Amino acid sequence: MPEEKSQNGRATRRIAAIDLGTNSFHAVIVDIYPDGSFSTVDTLKEMICLGKDGVGRMLSHSEMDLGIDTLKKIKTLCVHQNVEKILAYATSAIREAENGGVFIQRAIDELQIKIMAIPGIKEAELVAYAVQHGMQLGNIPHLIMDIGGGSTEFIIADNKEIFFKDSKKLGVSRMTADYIKHDPVTKSEIGLLSTYYQKRLIDIRKGLERYPTDVLIGSSGTMQNIASMIAAMKNLSTSVTLNEFEYSAEDFMKLYNSFIKLNRKKRLTIPGLDAKRVDFIIAGMILVKQVIEVFGIVRIKTSVQAMREGIIVSYIHQEMKSLQLLADYPDTRRRSIFELLRKCRWHEMHSSHVSNLALKLFDQTAKWHKLGQQEKELLEYSALLHDIGYHISHRKHHKHSLYIILNADLKGFSQEEIEVMAHVSRYHRRSTPNNRHQFFAGLNPSQKKLVKILAGYLRVADGLDRSHYQNVTDLRVEVGSKVRLYIKTIADPELEIWGAMRKRELFEDFFGKKLEIIPVEVLVPEVET
C-alpha cells in the first residue's frame, strides 16, 4: 500500500532508515502511526560508488572519508527533522571489505551511528517486506529481483508470504569490474557474462519450479532506471511515480537491442537514464535479459520501495507485536535476570546469540579453565546483560551496563556474584580490567581473576556477532600451539573475524597462546587423543 498518512491519531515515533549500499547511501525519514502505517517525511540519496573498482577489496581512505561525510549529511538531516531513532544497514561493499569493521567503528565513534552489516539473505527478506508493503501482489506468486551494486536479491512472494529468498553476488558494480573492460561492451564480454549469469541462476530456477510465475518485479535503482528509459521510449509520463509501472518482455528487448550497442557518451543521451549509473547499467541490462529468457518472464513491474522501506516495515512488525509476559521461571535467579532484561528493552537476538557462542567456547575449553556450573551460569547471564546499558545511552553503554547490574537488586545472587556479572558485562567492549578503574579495584583477587577469564570469553563471542545478525552459526575450538577457532557462517565472515580479533587480548592472556580464527564450510568434531 502507498505511504499515506494514517487518520488513526498522531505519529507515535519518527525514525530514519539508511541503506548503505555498494553504489549509493539512501536514507528515508518516516513518521510511524499507532495502526502500523507510516508516511515519508524526507529522503536523501547520495551516489558514492564504494564498489567502483570491485567488491570484496579493502576500502580506500578516500572512500571511507566520502562514506563518513555522506553519513554526516544524513545525520544532520535527522537532527533537523527530530528523528528519534536511526536504523542503518550495510550491504556487500562494507560487509565484504576486510576493513569494513573499521568503517563501522568510525561511524560509531564520529557520528554515534551504529551500522548493522547484514547478510544477503536478510537483505532479500527486507526487500520482500518493502515490495509486499508497496505493491498489489494479491495471492499470486511474483518473482522479485533487486539488483544492487554488490549483490542481487531474488525473492518469490505474494502479498502475505515469502516462499523463496536468495542472494547472489551478481551486483552491477561487481560484474562490471570483473567482466566489462571495453566501451561499448564487446560480444565476447556479453557472452561470458551471460554464461556466468546462467550458471548462478540455477538455484532460482528450482524455486520457480515450485512456485511458478511469469511476472518479474524489479526493485532499486537499476530496475527503476530501466523502467524510466522504457517509459521515455514509449512517450509515457512517470513524473509522479514509477511504482506499479509495467512493461512487457518485448518492450525490454527493444530497449536492450539498441542500448547494448551504445558507448558511454551515447548512453548518456538516453532519456530516463541516471547519469550516475551510466557505467554500471550494462551489466544490469544483461542480467535482466538472462532472467527474462531463462525463466520465461512475460511482464515486468516496478517497485519504488526497496530495502530502506523494508527496514521500516520490519521495525514496525517488531514494535507492533504484543508484549507477552515471560512465563514464570521456577528459578529465582533466571527470573530476576529476565525481568531486568525486559525492563531495559534488551537486544534479544544479539545478546542471546552472544550468550550461546560464549557458552560453546566455555564448554569446549573446560579442561583448561576447570570452572564449574556456577561460573558458567554467571557467564551466561553476563552475556545476556552485556548491552543493557543502551537503555540509558549508546555512549559508554558498557559502563551503564555495569551501573544497572550493580543497582538492579537482582534476586537470588550474592553480592560477589552480582559484582562479577557487572564487571564481565562492563568489559565486553574496548578496555580491559585495570586497577585504575575504581569499581574493579574494589574486587577481591578471586573475583578479579574470574572477571578476566569470563570477560575473555564474552569479548570473543561478542566480536563473533559484530554484525548483530547471527552470521556465525557454529564454532569449534582446538587448542594446540595456538587456540584455533573454526567458525561456520551463513555469509562472508570478515566482519566477525575482525570483531573477535580486536578483542582477543584477555582470551589469549588466559591460554598463553595466540588466537587464530578460521572460517570453514563444515565443522568436523575434534578427535579425542
Image (cartoon, rainbow, N blue to C red):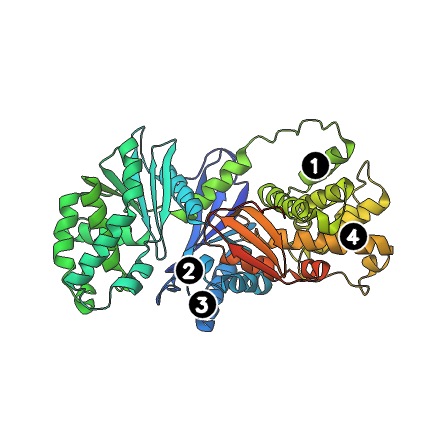
Question: Where residue 295 sits: x, y (%)?
Answer: 22, 40
Residue marked by disc 1: 338
Number of labels in the image equals 4
- Residue 341 placement, left or right of 122: right
Work out whether mark 2 precedes mark 1 in sequence or the reverse, and give the earlier one: 2
User: How far across and down, in percent of the image, does residue 316 sit?
Assistant: 50, 39
Of residue 502 and residue 28, the one placed in the foreground of this image is: 502
Cβ atoms at labels 3 and 2 below 8 Å apart:
yes
Contact, CB < 8 Å: mark 2 with mark 1? no
Circle nearer the N terminus (4, 1): 1
* Residue type, label 3: Leu
Camera-nearest residue between 29 and 365 = 365
Which part of the image, by quadrant, shows the N terminus?
top left
State left or right for residue 122 relative to residue 234: right
Left or right side of 258 for 220: right
Residue furthest to the front: 529
Q: Which disc, if any, is residue 450?
A: 4
Whichever of callouts 4 and 2 sits on the residue coming sooner in the sequence is 2
Outermost residue on the bottom side: it is 62
Looking at the image, which residue is at 73% across and 41% down? 377
Of helix, strand and loop, which one carries label 3?
loop
Task: Tell me the mark number nearer the camera, choosing from 4 and 3.
Answer: 4
Relative to 349, residue 460 above or below: below
Label 3 and label 2: CA atoms lie apart by: 8 Å
Residue to which mark 3 is pinned: 59
